[in-house]
Every structure is written in C-alpha cells, then in structure tokens.
Amino acid sequence: MMVVRPIQANDHEALRELGRKTGPGFTSLQDNDEQVATKLEAGLAAFTAGSVPVEALYLFVMEDTETQEVVGICGIESAVGLSDPWYNYRVGTLVHASRELDVYNQISTLTITNDHTGYSELCTLFLTPEARHSKQGSLLSKSRFMFLAEFPQRFNEHLIAEMRGYSDESGVSPFWEGLGRHFFSLDFAEADKISSMDKVFIAELMPKNTIYTNLLSKGAQDSIGKTHEATTPARRLLENEGLRYTGYIDIFDGGPTLEARVNDIRAIQESQYVKVHIADIPPDGETYLISTTEFSQFRCCMSPISRAGKNVITITPDVASALNVIESSTVRIVPLSSGRRF
Amino acid sequence: MMVVRPIQANDHEALRELGRKTGPGFTSLQDNDEQVATKLEAGLAAFTAGSVPVEALYLFVMEDTETQEVVGICGIESAVGLSDPWYNYRVGTLVHASRELDVYNQISTLTITNDHTGYSELCTLFLTPEARHSKQGSLLSKSRFMFLAEFPQRFNEHLIAEMRGYSDESGVSPFWEGLGRHFFSLDFAEADKISSMDKVFIAELMPKNTIYTNLLSKGAQDSIGKTHEATTPARRLLENEGLRYTGYIDIFDGGPTLEARVNDIRAIQESQYVKVHIADIPPDGETYLISTTEFSQFRCCMSPISRAGKNVITITPDVASALNVIESSTVRIVPLSSGRRF
Amino acid sequence: MLLIRPLTFADLQGLERLAVISGGRMTTLPANRDHLNELINRTRQSLRKEVTQYSDESYHFVLEDQTNGEIVGVCGIDASVGINTPFYSYRVDEVVHASSELQIHNRIPALHLCQDYTGSARLCTLFLDKDHRTKENLNLLSRSRMLFMAQHPERFANKLIAELQGVADSANRSPFWECLGRHFFNMDFTKANYLTGINSKGFIADLMPHYPVYVPLLSDEAQASLGQPRPDMIDVKNLLEEEGFNYRRYVDIFDAGPTLEARTQDIRTMTQSKKCTINIGSGSSSEKQVNVLISNTERENFRCLIVKLDPQQPEIAAEVASLLHLNNGDNIRIISL
Amino acid sequence: MLLIRPLTFADLQGLERLAVISGGRMTTLPANRDHLNELINRTRQSLRKEVTQYSDESYHFVLEDQTNGEIVGVCGIDASVGINTPFYSYRVDEVVHASSELQIHNRIPALHLCQDYTGSARLCTLFLDKDHRTKENLNLLSRSRMLFMAQHPERFANKLIAELQGVADSANRSPFWECLGRHFFNMDFTKANYLTGINSKGFIADLMPHYPVYVPLLSDEAQASLGQPRPDMIDVKNLLEEEGFNYRRYVDIFDAGPTLEARTQDIRTMTQSKKCTINIGSGSSSEKQVNVLISNTERENFRCLIVKLDPQQPEIAAEVASLLHLNNGDNIRIISL
C-alpha cells in the first residue's frame, strides 16, 4: 500500500537517493548534497513552525507501507515571490487596426510580470520509474489537493503549477534561442543551469518592455505555452482537476503555467468528510483518495471504498493502518478521477 | 408566464419603449430612434443569417405570455473586437525588490490590452422595474447560458461580461478623475457620452504605457475593479455561475470584466437533455430553467418540475405552451440556481 | 544651363514624371496628381504669405533645364513639420541589461517611436533625374534651398533635419521594412510610403508598434540597415555633413534611413553665404572667378543657378541676369562652392 | 587668498566637514569616511596615471583659504560616467495622444529612465562654504576645473554634463521625490541619495520604475519642480550657461533637478583660455590689469587662483607665484573673468 505523508528528518537518505534518480531536467531536486539538505530542512521547518508561516515549503513523500521504501516526492510552496520576485511572461493581445485603410492586425505580445506573487505553487513532483503504475502518480500528485483542502488557511486562494517548456530532440529550447539568447552572452545549457538555481538572474537581463511575438522566430512563436513532451501527462492530470493555462509562461523556456482558484479544483470542491468503518471485506466501489485530518501526521492513500451508510465508508484494515485511523475516525474522501475531461 | 425568445421585427415598438426606460447609465439601449433601429436590425440579422456569422448580436426579449408584453431584453455578442479593437486595462503586479537593501515593493500596474479580442460577451441586460421580482431577472440573464449551451459553435470558448464601474453620489467616477481626465480635455459627463458611443476614441487618447497605480489618487486606486452599486446583484448572479474577475477592467470607469470559459459555467456544465411529459398536476420540485433546442424558435422559461422517470420531466400545459413543445419533445434543463456560493 | 525656381502650376506634368521615375520611395513625392497639385498649391501660398511666425509652410523648387524647359529635379523645404499631421521617427536608444552577479553588462539598442523632431524645419523631396546626376547639379539642387533659407531665416524653425533614404535591394525592397513594418502594416513598403505621402491621417499611429522594438530581435539584414543611407545617397550625405549636419541616432520608421540634423542658423550656407549687389557686364573670365551658387533675394520669383564669377566683385552676363530676374545693382546672395 | 588644488589625504577632515554641512543633498559627497577616502584615493591615482584613453578617472579639487589653511570648497570632474556603475537620468519626452475624430491633440510629457549620458564627462561635487559664497569664489571653484580640462583635454569625454540640485522645501524635502521616488524606494531622499553616493550597485535598477512615468499623474508641486534648479543654484546655472551649457530635458532621477550639457571642446573656458608664459615681478597694478583665472599647467601639482594682471603681459608677484608653484618663464593658462 502506498501512502503519502509529510517528509521526516530520517528521510534524508531516501531523499538523497531520489535526487540521484531525477535526471538533469528536474532542477528542483538534483544529485547534490547541499540542495537535498536545504530542501529537507525547509520541508521539516514547514511542519514544525509554531504559527502559520507566510512562506513555507510543504514536502511529502510517498512510502510503500510494506517495504518502508520512499518512492516519490511532491511539494507545495505556500507563497512564491515574496523574497525574490517571481517572474512570468504574460501572453497578451494587441489589435492594430485602421478603419480608414481596412487593415486589422491582431498581434500577440509578451510582457514581463510578477502577477503570481503570493500564489501557492505545486512543485517538486517526482516518482521513481519503477513506481509509475497503478495510478500511483495520480495519488502522489493529487494527495496535495487533499492537504490543500484540509488546511486552506496555510495557502493562497490561487494555485499555480509550472510546466516544463518545449525543447527539441537535441534539448535546445527554441523559445530561448529566439528570445532570451539575444539578451545574454550565454548558450542554452549554461543559461539553463543558472535558471535552475535562480530565475531572478534571468529576469534581470530579459527585456523589460513588451515584446511583439511576430518579430520572433517561428520556432520561438510556436513554443509559447507549449509543454515538454515528458510533462504532457502531468499537464493533463492537472487540467482534469480544473487547472488552466491562462496565458502565463516561463520567461526562460516558454513553458505554460497552469492556474486555478483553490476552491475551484475538482478534488478540493468535491471532497467531503466521512467516518470510517473498518471491515475485512474487499471493497468494490470506485477508487477514492482518502486522507486524514491531521497536520503533521497527515496521511493520504487511495483505495476502492464501499459506502456503509450516509457519510460512512468501509475500508480494509490495511488502509486503516496505512492512514493510521481507527473505527469512526473522520477522513476526507474524493473520487480519484473526475468524470469530466477537458 | 415569462418566456425568453429571440427578438422579432414586430418587437420594434416594445424595444423603443424599453429604451425610454433604461436611464442614462445604460448606454447600450437609450431613448434614441437610431440606436434602437440599429440594434433591432443587428438582432434580426443574427437569427436569419444563412451560415454562422463571425460577428453577431443575439438579442432576446422576455415576454409575458398572458399579456404579450415585452418586459426585458438581453443579448450575447458572438465575438468582440474584430472590427474595432476591444480595450481593457489589465491589472498586473510588479515587484521591485533589492536583496542588498532589504527593500521589497509590490506595485500594482495597469496595462492597456486587447486580450479579449474574439471573446463572446454577455450584453444589453435590462428588465423593467415592475418585472423585477420572482427571480425573473435570473431567468432573463441565465436564459443566455441555455442558448450558449445549445449553440456552442456560434460562440467563442471564452465568455466575458462587463460590469459598470463605481461612481460616487454625484455620479462622478474617481477612476476617470484620477487617470483618464489627465489625458483628455473633457469632463466626465462628456467623456461618458463619448465612451458610450465608441470606446475606441477613449483608447486612442489613453496612455499606451503601463501605469503605476501607486501614482494615482487614492480614489482612483480604490475604484479599480469595483462594481457600481446598482450592478452588484448582477455581478453576484454571474459569479454564482462561475464567472470571475480576472484582473481586466474598463479603461474608462475601472469597472471589472467577469470572465469564464463557456464550458466551466455552472448552468451550461450541469444542464442536460430530458423529454417532457405534459400533465396538469402542480409540480413540486426545484425551480429549473427549461429551454428548447430550436435556433430561431428558441424559448426559455423557468418552472418547478417533477421527475417523471430517468430523463423525463413533468411540466404543466402552461409551460409547454410557453415553450411551444409537445409531449415527448426534448428540452434542456438546469436548476435555476447553484447550490454553491462564491 | 540649369535653373532653380519655385514650383508653378505649369510644372504638374514634369513633377508627375519625376514622381514616377523616383519609384515611390520618396514619401513627399507620391505619384498622385491631387497630391502633387496640392504640393504646388502649398508652395504658391507659402511664398505669397507674409510670415512673421513660421508654421506649416512648405516650399518646393524645380530644377529646369533652360535648353529645353524640362524639369529635371525637385527639392523642398518644410518650415516646420508635425504641425498638422504627426511626424514620427524611430530613436535608437540603448537600454542597459546588467546583472552584477552574472558579470554581464549588455547595452541593448531599441527603437522608440517618437515625435522628437516635431517643430523642426525639414529639407525634403530631393530628386534629380539620373541623366543630370552630377555633383555640381546636386549642389545646385540641394544648396539653392539653403540660400533661400539664408535670405528668409524668419520663415524656418531653428532646428533643421534631412532624411536620407535607407537601404533597399535591387527589387527596391527595404530589409528593414520586410522585417518590421510589414508585420504591422500588412502592405508593401511602396504602399505604406504612398499613404504617408498623401497624409492619410493617423494610420501610422493606428498600426505602428507602440512599445520599443529591441534591435537584436530583428533580422541581420534589418539590423545592418539601421541608420544606413542607400548607397546612391552618399553624395547627398557628404554634402549635408559638409553643411554641418549630424546623425543623432534617429531613423526613418519605414526604411531606417538616417535623419541628419543641424541648427538652422549654423549650416555653412547660412553662415558663409553673403548678400551683395550684382554688376551686369560681360561676365568675361578672370583668374579670380570661381564657381558660385547665386540667387536673387526674392520669394515668389526666387531664382538660383551656378555661375563662375569673382565673389569680391560679382559680375554676370546679361543673359544670366535675365534668368535670375536681376537688374544691374540688384541684391544677390552668393556662396562659393 | 583662496587657492584651488587637488585633494590630498590630509584633506579628509576638511572634506568631511563639507559633506556634513552640505546636508546630504549631494550624491557625490556622502558623509561617509570610507567613501571620502576613496574620493581622495581616486583623485590621486587619476592624477598619477598617464592617460591615453580616458576611462573612469575622477579628479577632485579643494578650495583652500590661505590665511588659515581651512578647506572652504570642493569641486570635481569625472572623466566619463557610467563605466562601472550605471548612470541614470530621466529624459522628459513628449508623447502625442491624438484623436482626429475628437479633434484632440495632446502632447503628454513622460519621464523615461535612461542612461543616455553614459560615457559623458561630468562636472560634479560643487560645494562652497556659505561664508565664502561670492560670485568670484564660485567662478574660481567652478571654472578652475575647466582650466584643468583645457590643459588636459585628452583626459575627458567629448560631451560634458553638470547636474544642478533640484527644488527642495525648507525641510530639505524634494516634492518630486515625495511624489515619485518614495513610492518605489520606501526610504527618504537623503538615504537614497546616500546609497547612490556610496555606489550601492544595482539598487536603482532594482527599485526604479521601468515604464515611463506620465507627468500629468504627478502632483502639481512635483510637476512644477521638473527641470528646476534649487534657487541657490541660479548663480551656478548662469555660470554654466555662460560657458555654453544647455538644458536638454534631462533631469535627475531623485529630485528632478536639470542636467546641463555641452560639447567639452566648445565651452568658453576651453575655447578662450590661453596658454602663455609667466613673468614674476612686482605684480604692481596697471590700467590693463583685469581679474583672471590663472593656473599652472601641472597635474598632480595643479594650482589655480584669481589674480589681477594684464593678460597680454602676464606678470605676478613672487608670493602668488609661490602659491601657484611657478618659476619665472613657466607655462601658465589664463582666462579673463
């Protein structure tokens, strides 16, 4: 049974191990002692702070209850851009038209903004390749919505998630080549490295005035808001929950930012409290996310459930044990997947 | 029984009469022969055009089936900004921060955009004061969602609605006084008049560069995105259906634009087809919007319904007659109001 | 002998011929009869007007071949531009993009649409038929205007500009236009130029980019053409630079040709031309004779040509005097070439 | 008698006194011992350096009262600004907002943050103790620098600017800063000025508005102060204008005081000062004597003062010669006041 729970001090070795597996595209968790240590420290601080912190990184791991192995990680930043500015390009439209000449031009523009300042952010999602089956990716990603639903006062009413931008077979981003490169003396690889460390550097050098996209290369224009192939499933998952591309992109690779009001997210909106009845009968219903109401002892797993009455569900002892709940405990549930498709 | 239906040529006198009642704030339908004639013509053209027109104004009236009196009007523009540019200010955020000095400033900005170009727009909603009871305003406004649900191919996937902006007791807009006025040689009344005719004039004179709102008067800053008192109920109604203020405001008075994807609107998303059973028994269920599936003969009314089986509802002969449907006709229904509050 | 004189209505056909062979690259000379007529009309009205404070007057002159009466060149001066219709330029500014942490300090040029030359006088509409394109004729055509200005300084603004046509390929296509203007105007260069020439009000404001355009985002060809005159404009450029004109990083919004500027009162023809009286005689040659630009001091009957004379004791033959509408002892203005 | 000479390390205390009484309004003279030390250090290094291509050298001079050795004034020249730290100004541009249909044509001034004066030489840090504020002393203090420049023109950029302090109220508050800068910096004027002075890198770029600021949105007081010098700067302004400086609509980003500019080689002291040799004699008065600014032609031992002499046959008393480090027959540079 897979369970998602807050990160703990003794997860250090597991986290270090995950960092070795992520690969170069996953900039937020690398094979890097210092980064892992910093990350762990931030994650622990979030769950142990006395009052509600303004800026906190809530980090969770997914653990196999049978083997105690940590196979995945996910996180939520409570608020971005409050220390260093948080930059995006916003894709806008300008119409240049002359009635007299019967000319009508619709021009797409890019403007640098900090509009998402203070928003909460879904971040740091990684699942080891071996564990990528049986909807375990969905559990890992969506467990965060259950946490958000339970502790809304710890988060902004707006939630964003950045999608990695398109790059070609040789790993080069046409968006960077067509725009950023002109303002730097750096090639993509070097800029990529800097970008992963601190995007403020990039923003300082990017043009401050609105860019007319029709002056960019075709490749750069086509990359605006385009998701990297490897990230497309993650995007689909979030879109099915109600997150939307609203015209904000990464200043570096042009990847889209998805956005939603927390209260409009399906898993949050449709989740409800029920009491549990524990019984060793195989449940036959739809698969649900089930999470506890505790903060530092938060647990989330997925399981088919049976309804045992209005507001009572039946779960197996296995599940109860993974969640650390007893008979009549209150839990939050929501169907793992939405019926709707977007 | 009130029924909403497409406008017809013989509604001219009724439309003229409505124009007399709207008052000066309602710029899209005034006591003005020419405007009424133009409006009617546009409305008729939308329903009689051979193929699907790119730009069309779908106009509906609400008629009392007992008296045949027209008591209200509402409309949908299929696409704005395709002839004359459609302007908004977008409210953005810029962060000016210096780590070195430990200074962090979040600054709100206004940038002129045509971002809503091509979007569909809810417009021209007016109900005579005498008819403002029994949720008839909801019927009139929401009937448009039923039409949108039925004929999505005639509309953009994005829908907007402009809310009148705040003005003080003496009818003066602090937003105008604090911003636009500096760029014009006109007072509010004169500018208001011009604005109602053609907003392009205003846009031509407004500053093209981003405005830092912290340089504006307090009154102007406070009016950004603020709805006129008289329009607040209309705003609430649309927000309950899922339309949202997303940071776009009127360049003239600072009033908010509400926005949603058509498919995310509650009345559209939750509406469904059912067959009707006509029976003269007083229905006791929840009040529903009921609309027909015809284009030029579109009808929408509201009534409590009873379920007569899966996908069959019972309606009274009155309602059937108002909708012009017979036993077993297919209609679209949705609960008049959402359970959710925003 | 070639003679400069103000436009008259009889010049319409000759002007039209020049407009056509200039190939539509000159904004102020569109091949449009109504507009050319208006050009003549404005010149006549401007010359007649008693000017105390200059405004939107425009003076155009033709170069007439005295042997056959043919119009072989045209040139003009606007008293001050941007009065009735906005006058746009691109100013090439540099924006610094720096990051102390990254040790990067980039100066990025960007084009700012501006109207900074509003109110300046302008030398304009310079076109010389190919068959007569010699350095001397160019001097006559271009500098005769300055002699007119020297004689009537109160009629012109204090700042003076001249726009040089920008780089174009053999098919008369401007790389700058192809890269930038075309995206915003949806028409070809010639048409845009023509519409500007016939004063189609506001269309530039309606269609041009309002935000600065970053030069590094332009094509290499477009970048290379920034502020570069068309190769056949080099003589004109040299002439203007000798007069004291400078390039101050303002370029034409359509073809990125450079705009040169000077203080009106400081240009060489203004400071070094002198007013004196003429002696009509044999005009026979002496050692002291040099080529000079000579004009009468009139307005509506302004005449100017190049002749050899002794600047200390100016004397011309009766034949030349007649071309210049001069009687013995009349005032003249001369400058050595 | 007052004497101009380059800063030395012994001047630190005197300089600090001036920094304090100048009240923190002068960016280049912050009351910060480290920075003042650095100012002296740079001056010494710049003077020692053999310059073929000017760079970021900075020369500062003090005005010393010979009667008591007190430092009563300071002035400086930067060889070229914006080399190591960006040099910002606001350029006041006009943007046209016009609607032909409405018959409205507005010219709206807007402030553009720019670095247009990057690379220019700058006259800076002019401060004269109140007790000695006479026109003659101001002339000595300000023009002595120009005499130094005239002697060493290769050390300075071609364009020369001077910034005049802007309007402030009795409490030393700038209405421009209160209306604009304060919103973006979250600190008072003096602190911002101080931080700029000690070269706190990048903080202006981090905090300043990047978009143009529309002047009509500023308070009336702030608008009125645009390009206006503080009243007690009028003498300095007149002096610079006599030298040939012009205001070209560039203002200080903090207090909106005007920046004046000139071509370095064209300023009066450059064009009219002359180099000649000195005769040391009685220095006794004659009718032909006038007040002149006189300096030796040295660098590290540069000295300058005002004395009465006959410019055609310059002769000074031994006492004055000693102050100027001059021997009989040495080269001098003089200009009449």
Image: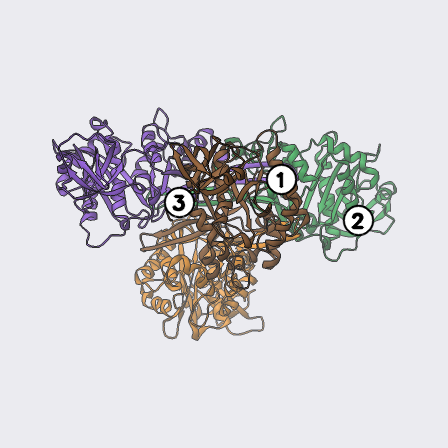
Chain colours: A brown, B purple, C orange, D green
The percent position of residue B114, horizontal first and vertical second, equals: 39, 47
Q: Residue at x 48, y 68 (%)?
A: C138
Which of pointers 2 and 3 indicates the residue nearer the eye?
A: 3
Q: Is residue C199 left or right of residue A292?
A: left
Which of pointers 2 and 1 indicates the residue nearer the eye?
A: 1
Q: CA distance from mark 2 to mark 1?
A: 59 Å
**Relative to the observer, which residue lies in front, C141 or B266?**
B266
Question: Which chain letter goes with mark 2?
Answer: D
Residue to which mark 2 is pinned: D45
**Relative to the observer, which residue lies in front, A205 or B220?**
A205
The percent position of residue D7, horizontal first and vertical second, equals: 80, 42
Indicate the secondary structure of the residue bearing disc 1.
Answer: loop
Can residue A152 be seen from the camera position used here?
yes
Indicate the secondary structure of the residue bearing disc 3.
Answer: loop
Q: Residue at x 30, y 63 (%)?
A: C33
Residue B193 falls in which quadrant of the image? top left
Q: CA distance from mark 2 to mark 3?
A: 74 Å
Residue to which mark 1 is pinned: A8
The percent position of residue A113, horizontal first and vertical second, equals: 51, 44
Q: Kindly indicate whether the residues beneath marks 1 and 3 are on one polypeptide chain.
A: yes
Find the residue positioned furthest to the front: A280
Q: Are marks 2 and 3 in contact (CB under 8 Å)?
A: no
Other residues around mark 1 within 10 Å, as few (<14) / some (14–19) / many (≥20): some
Three-letter amino acid code at the position of disc 2:
Gln
Q: Is residue C182 left or right of residue A187?
A: left
Question: Which chain letter goes with mark 3?
Answer: A
